[in-house]
Image (cartoon, rainbow, N blue to C red):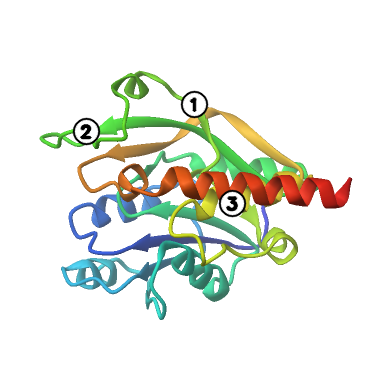
Amino acid sequence: MNQPESVSAIVIVKNGARFLAAALSSIQRQTFAPFETLVVDGGSTDRTAEIAQSFPGVRYLLQPHSGISNAYNYGIEQAQGEVLAFLSYDDLWTPEKLAVQVGYLAAHPECQYAVCRIHYFCELGDALPAGFRPEWLAQEPVAYIMETLVARRSLFARVGLHRTDLATGGDTDWFARVFDAREIGHACDQVLLHKRVHRDNSSLTAPDSNDQLLKILRNSLRRKRATG
């Protein structure tokens, strides 16, 4: 395939020693390898730094400002690739993830990003988080989340980085801005991300997520009205 010159894999983590090695190993098993892997650490107090730095070729970065949105923004700013891909410390890429999504972008220059289907799996011995529905374990939906995203760097230059004033839902707001800007994207019809469900899933346990989603929807409606 006609590949972009460079792909950066960006992993965000805070106190992720329990699962980080598995996430980084899933990057190393890619059939199309990124030219760099960045681990953005939000100030871990466990063995996260030691584990990240034990993987050859990993750039370990200590995040200067707190919060998930700041972690993504810092990773994007520090990455050197033309195409950016994202992974949380507790999730796993399938071996062909980058090959499929980067290959699609290479074959379709008009396409700015690609997402994919996900498969949820429950960490053995962990109870399901309060916000998680058990039936989701049997579903494989297309997910517009950072962990499925492979995007051209130029897309962030046009749409902007993550808003740091949102406690949760920064990725939802970012995708809403992408949709409102009518950027061309693609949903790959296969599972390329295995999303781990465990007791510490912050995205499933945030207490103010509904309020944040309402704020994001109101902002999206304002943008649509402004552009007609």
- Of the 4 image quadrants, the one containing the N terminus is top right
Badge 3 marks a residue whose secondary structure is helix
Badge 1 marks a residue whose secondary structure is loop
Q: Which residue is mark 3?
A: 173
Q: Position of residue 162 (x, y in %)?
A: 57, 62
How many residues crowd around disc 2 within 10 Å: few (fewer than 14), some, or many (20 or more)? some
Q: Which residue is mark 1?
A: 141
Mark 1 or mark 3: whose residue is earlier in sequence: 1
Badge 2 marks a residue whose secondary structure is loop
Q: Position of residue 13 (x, y in %)?
A: 33, 62
Mark 2 or mark 3: whose residue is earlier in sequence: 2
- Of the 4 image quadrants, the one containing the C terminus is top right
Q: Looking at the picture, which amino acid does disc 2 mark?
A: Leu
How many residues crowd around disc 3 within 10 Å: few (fewer than 14), some, or many (20 or more)? many
Q: Are marks 1 and 3 in contact (CB under 8 Å)?
A: no
Camera-near label (1 vs 2) is 2
Query: Real-space Cα distance between discs 2 and 3?
Result: 26 Å
Q: Is residue 175 left or right of residue 169?
A: right
Q: Is residue 11 left or right of residue 117?
A: left
Residue depicted at x 60% and y 66%: 81
In this rendering, the answer to whether 68 lies above or below 126 is below
Q: Looking at the picture, which amino acid does disc 3 mark?
A: Asp
Q: Which residue is mark 2?
A: 128
Query: Which image quarter: residue 186?
Result: top right
Q: Looking at the picture, which amino acid does disc 1 mark?
A: Pro
Q: Relative to the observer, which residue lies in front, 221 or 146?
A: 221
Query: Which image quarter: residue 199?
Result: top left
In this rendering, the answer to whether 24 lies above or below 175 is below
